[in-house]
Structures are given as C-alpha cells and as structure tokens.
Image: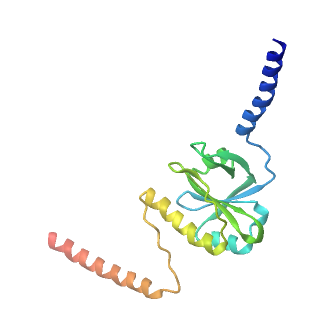
Amino acid sequence: MKILKVLIVLFIAVVFPITTMGNAAPTNSGYNYQLYKNFENFGILIFPKDRIFTGLGEYIKAIGFNPVESGQAVMRFGLKNENQSLMMPESVQKKHSMDRFIILQVIANDNMLVGIFDPEWGLTLPGPTFNLDGIKENISKTLNLFREHLKKRETKRYHPDKPERARLLTKNAAIIIDETSHFISKLH
C-alpha cells in the first residue's frame, strides 16, 4: 500500500508539470515585435524588432504597409491549436481588426523564418529559411491568396517603369466615357 501511494505521488509530480508546461505561454518572451498594416487590414509582423534591417523595412513600406504598433511578443497557438509562434497579443490583433497576417522572424545573416496566420488555414509555419528576395516573391503570392480568398481584386499601383500602361488606361477611359455618353443620349 505504501508503495502504491509513493508511485501515485511520483506519477502526479512528474505528469502534472509536463502537461502544464505544454499549455504554457510565456508572457515575457524577451522579443519585441513591429506590426505593419495595409488598407486591406492585412498585416505583417516582424520580430525581433531590433533586427529589422534597412532593405526589409524599405520593402514593407514600398508595398503599402505602415507601422501601427510595437510591443512585447507573446507565444500564441493558431486557432486550431496546431502550431505556435511568437506574435502580437490577441488584444492587439483584435484592436486592428486583423484576421490575416504574415509573421517574419529575422534570424542570422538577414535570413527569415515565415509564418502565416489565417482564420481558415490556422497558423502555418513553413520550414525553410528565406532571404529578402525569397520573402519579396512569397509575400506578394501570400497577399494575393488572402485577396483571392476574400474575393478582393488586387489593386494595381502605378509603376514608373511602365508609363505605356498608364497612357493606355487614360486613353481607354476617354473612349469608355465617349461611348457611355453616346449610349445615354440614344435612350432619351
């Protein structure tokens, strides 16, 4: 009987800390994050904030993301408890109405690990590391997937390296206005 009690106490002493350790989310990770947001309420979260290098910061701003908040990163699970990563607190996510965002963890030599947070996909953590060129290629693809998923069309920006496109658009707009006004005058 004594042996049984000792085994039960040992079992509880060993199993209880292990199960609570798996659910623990440290409040103080030691990393600060920088959160960027665009007009579509998509976000890019980068941590550690002090490792954001010039090329990355310039690229994020060039694609229409503005810094909105920074603070202490916390460990969070995805919506389906499938993965976990450091990111902004849930209250910050709700404050900015941000359902879809990309997480970038800057590691050595300006390489990055990527995470994608989406309400339907959960938290996706691809394995490989990416350099800035790989990030540029994959961020645009991911944003287009977010837009496609929301049935939003991609917003085209004026590119100075393609002025013929801008001229073509203005020329077509004039033709469309002419034809529309001609069509409306026939109705009366």
* Residue at horizontal 53 percent and vertical 85 percent from the top: 160
Question: Please, which residue is most extreme toward the top here?
Answer: 1
Residue 169 shown left or right of residue 116 in the figure: left
Residue 91: % across, % down: 66, 44
Q: Is residue 87 visible?
A: no
Quarter in which the C terminus is drawn: bottom left
For the question of whether residue 132 can be seen, the reply is yes
Q: How far across and how far down the image is residue 95, in percent?
A: 62, 47
- Pick the front one: 13 or 111: 13
Image coords of residue 183 (percent x, y): 20, 74
Q: Nearer the viewer, residue 92 or 133?
A: 133
- Residue 106, quarter of the rendered image: bottom right
Foreground residue, 182 or 172? Answer: 172
Task: Name which quarter of the figure residue 18 lies in.
Answer: top right
Horizontal relation, residue 24 to residue 2: left or right? left
Q: Residue shown at 15%/73% (left/top)?
A: 186
| Location of the N terminus (image quadrant) | top right
Residue drawn at (47%, 87%), measured in percent from left and top?
Answer: 163
Q: Position of residue 154 (x, y in %)?
A: 46, 67
Name the residue rendered at 77%, 26% in the picture.
11
